[in-house]
Structures are given as structure tokens and as C-alpha cells.
Image: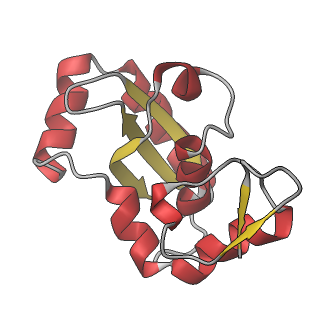
Amino acid sequence: MIRRQPAVYILASKRNGTLYIGVTSDLLKRCWEHKNNLVDGFTKQYGVHQLAYFELHRHITEAITREKQLKKWNRAWKLKLIEKHNPDWKDLWQEIASMNNERIVRYVTPECICRGSSPEFSGFPRKTCGNDKLKHYS
């Protein structure tokens, strides 16, 4: 089970598609935010939502240093890194999420985020808010 821990991650729009490199202290939550377009900017604009690669670190300073290093790499090196560890380009977030279902519910419920239904949460009970088109997950 992955707990709150510094991580560097690479998101992709699709296999060999647009890449985004980021750093976070909570990988599960941050990737969920990207997937649900709660993060304005590059990933939202270009539809970069699949977790293709990640590394966990002991300290946030190590993760930040590694993020800066990866951002300086050329595209071919980044693709080779992903291919080495995730040759099928599976969305690793789904694997992490399946180990952390309780945490996912915690992220969504307290803030009561109204962002519409999401296939990642199809098994969770829903509460309708005042707007019929929007759902809350409980």
C-alpha cells in the first residue's frame, strides 16, 4: 500500500504521446486530481492523464532533484525509461488506486468535489448534489 510519500511521476496522454513530469508528496491524490482535470494547466489542456511511470523517494528534496533531472532528459530517454518499467503502458494509477480504495473515498468526500461521474469511481455509491448533472462520491 502506498502511503503519503514523495514521488516523481510521468503522465502520458497515450502510448508514446504527450508527456508530463511532476513531483508530489501524495501520488494517489495528485494523479486523481490530474485525471479529473482539477489541475489547471498543461495536463488539463492536452489531456495528459495516464500514470505511465513513478518513483518513490524518502525525502521531498530528493524527489525534486530527480524531477529536475528527468525534465532535462531528451524525449527518447524518457520513453525508454517508461518502456523499461511499463512496457504495456498500463495506467499505473488504477493499480495504486485498487490498493487504496479507502483513501480515494476520503479525497472525494471531505471536499465534496462536484466534477461529474468518472469511470474510475463507478463502483462507489453516488450522492446527487443540487445540480442534476453533477455527482458526489461517498
Q: Nearer the viewer, residue 74 or 36?
A: 36
Above or below residue 100? Residue 94 is above
Above or below residue 116? Residue 103 is below
Quadrant for the N terminus in the image: bottom left
Which residue does the image show at 62% across and 57% down from the upper left? 25
Q: Would residue 46 be seen by someone viewing this image from the given angle?
A: yes
Q: Nearer the viewer, residue 87 or 44?
A: 44
Which residue does the image show at 45% across and 33% down from the upper left? 21
Which residue does the image show at 19% across and 45% down from the upper left? 89
Q: Would residue 57 be seen by someone viewing this image from the given angle?
A: no
Q: Position of residue 112 (x, y in %)?
A: 82, 62
Q: How many marks?
A: 0
- Left or right, 55 with reference to 108: left
Q: Position of residue 61 (x, y in %)?
A: 60, 48
Q: Position of residue 58 (x, y in %)?
A: 52, 65
What residue occupies the far right of the structure in this picture? 130
Q: Position of residue 136 (x, y in %)?
A: 73, 64
Quadrant for the C terminus in the image: bottom right
- Left or right, 111 with reference to 91: right
Which residue does the image show at 40% across and 75% down from the upper left? 98
Above or below residue 57? Residue 134 is above
Q: Nearer the viewer, residue 63 or 48?
A: 48
